Image: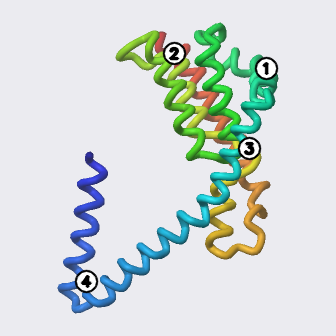
Amino acid sequence: MAMSVIWTVMVGAAILCGLATGNGPAVAKGALDGAAAGVELCLSMMGVLCLWMGVMEVMERSGLAGGLSRLMRPVLRWLYPGFAKNKPVMDRVSANFSANLLGLGNAATPLGLEAARLMAERTPGVASDGLCMLVVCNTASLQLIPTTVASLRAGAGSAAPFDILPAVWLASVISVTVGITAAKVFARLWR
């Protein structure tokens, strides 16, 4: 709600300033150009996201997602000790983690929300340590393939949209390490 008000005020102020300075036609042209660019960007990203969502579905149906879940189980048990024996929660967390590894923020979000909903059932009205860890890991999101960013770069005309991989890997490792460390430390401090 607050963001809607903030954006509405910003757009209204921009329109009023444009009209007051005699730049009304430029503001109108900018709004139309921006809308067209937004539609083009959405269409260019849609193909990449559909591809990776299809890959995630194939992984799930072929059992590869389950294998990946078993492979990640030791790490996920350490990160989420309170939910280690809760298979539905751990399956959603594993799927969320997999989607984040592929850089599918849009696909990871519904999986993370489902995991958070299942976690919140145990402690309604209170964010458990596991739920806080989920938010940290989903926000920091360790990425091997930054699909969304690469599709944005390709849509903007980049000749090599994946040339950012080393920077993404370094930033991902640092953000996840700092986030997990902070979550573990604060979980011990506030018991």
Q: Specify few, some or many for label 2: CA neighbours under 10 Å numbering under 14, 14-19, or 20 or more.
A: few
Where 147 sits versus 136, above or below? below
Query: Pointer 1: what residue?
Result: 70
Query: What amino acid type should be assigned to the residue bearing mark 3?
Result: Val
Residue 5 place in picture, x, y as percent: 23, 54
Query: Which badge, 3 or 1, comes first in the chain's sequence?
Result: 3
Q: CA distance from mark 3 to mark 2?
A: 41 Å
Q: Specify few, some or many for label 4: CA neighbours under 10 Å numbering under 14, 14-19, or 20 or more.
A: some
The disc label shown at residue 89, or none = none
Locate residue 87: give its quadrant: top right
The disc label shown at residue 18, or none = 4
The residue depicted at 63 percent of the width and 33 percent of the height is 96
Query: Pointer 3: what residue?
Result: 55
Closer to viewer: mark 1 or mark 4 = 1
Classify residue 125 as left or right of residue 44. left
Whether residue 94 can be seen here: yes
Residue 56 place in picture, x, y as percent: 70, 39
Query: What amino acid type should be assigned to the residue bearing mark 2?
Result: Leu
Q: Are marks 3 and 2 in contact (CB under 8 Å)?
A: no
